[in-house]
Image: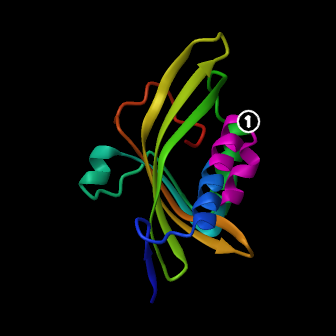
Amino acid sequence: MSMTMVSNGMDPALRARIEDLYAAYAHTIDDDRLEDWPGFFAARGRYRVTTRENHDLGLPLSLIYCDGRAMMHDRISALRTANIYEPHVYCHAISAVRVLETRDGVHRARSNFVVHRTMSEGDTTTFACGRTFDAIIEEDGVLRFAERVAVLDSRRIDTLLVIPV
């Protein structure tokens, strides 16, 4: 059971690969390639969006919860065919990526994010900001999320949370 702490001896190549995973994830959403989004997760990966309050209290309530890639594909299919929402696009800004530890092949990492939303008329607002807490594994030479928890700083979302953050 080996453990590597970030502050002492984190492999720079691994850190770069993890940062690249975060960037590719954000660009996939921002470029509206949502059908590719589930591929960032392990087959049995989990994705949750919750509020800071629920996270801090250890409450399991989520605004979005997907358990497994199949649920993620279903979410995107529903988004494309059944959901009705005002057209908009996201622009992610990800910062403070920190690899916390590596243990037994699982890389624990966190980041901060801000998502700007631009409506079809051109109005741009800050849609969401918060932190992610991630468990990342390697499958066949590819880094994937085994778990991704997006913790929103605000519990108030002014419109339907449709697109993953």
What residue type is disc 1 on? Asp
Corner quadrant of residue 156: top left
Front residue of this view, candidates 38 and 86: 38
**Residue with the most extreme front position:** 9
Q: Position of residue 112 (x, y in %)?
A: 45, 44
Q: Position of residue 164 (x, y in %)?
A: 58, 43
Does 102 appear above or below 74? below
Residue stretch rendered in magenta on the structure = 23-40
Q: Position of residue 52 (x, y in %)?
A: 32, 45
Binning the other alpha carbons within 10 Å of mark 1 as few (below 14), some (14 to 19) or many (20 upward) gives few
Corner quadrant of residue 43: bottom right
Q: Position of residue 74 (x, y in %)?
A: 68, 52
Does 140 appear above or below 85? below
Q: Residue at x 64, y 55 (%)?
A: 21
Residue 25 falls within the magenta-colored stretch: yes
Q: How many marks?
A: 1
Mark 1 residue element? loop
Q: Which residue is mark 1?
A: 31
Does 10 appear above or below 85? below
* Quarter the C terminus occupies: top right
Corner quadrant of residue 141: bottom right
Magenta stretch: dominant secondary structure: helix
Q: Is residue 133 shown left or right of residue 17?
A: left
Q: Is residue 44 shown left or right of residue 106?
A: right
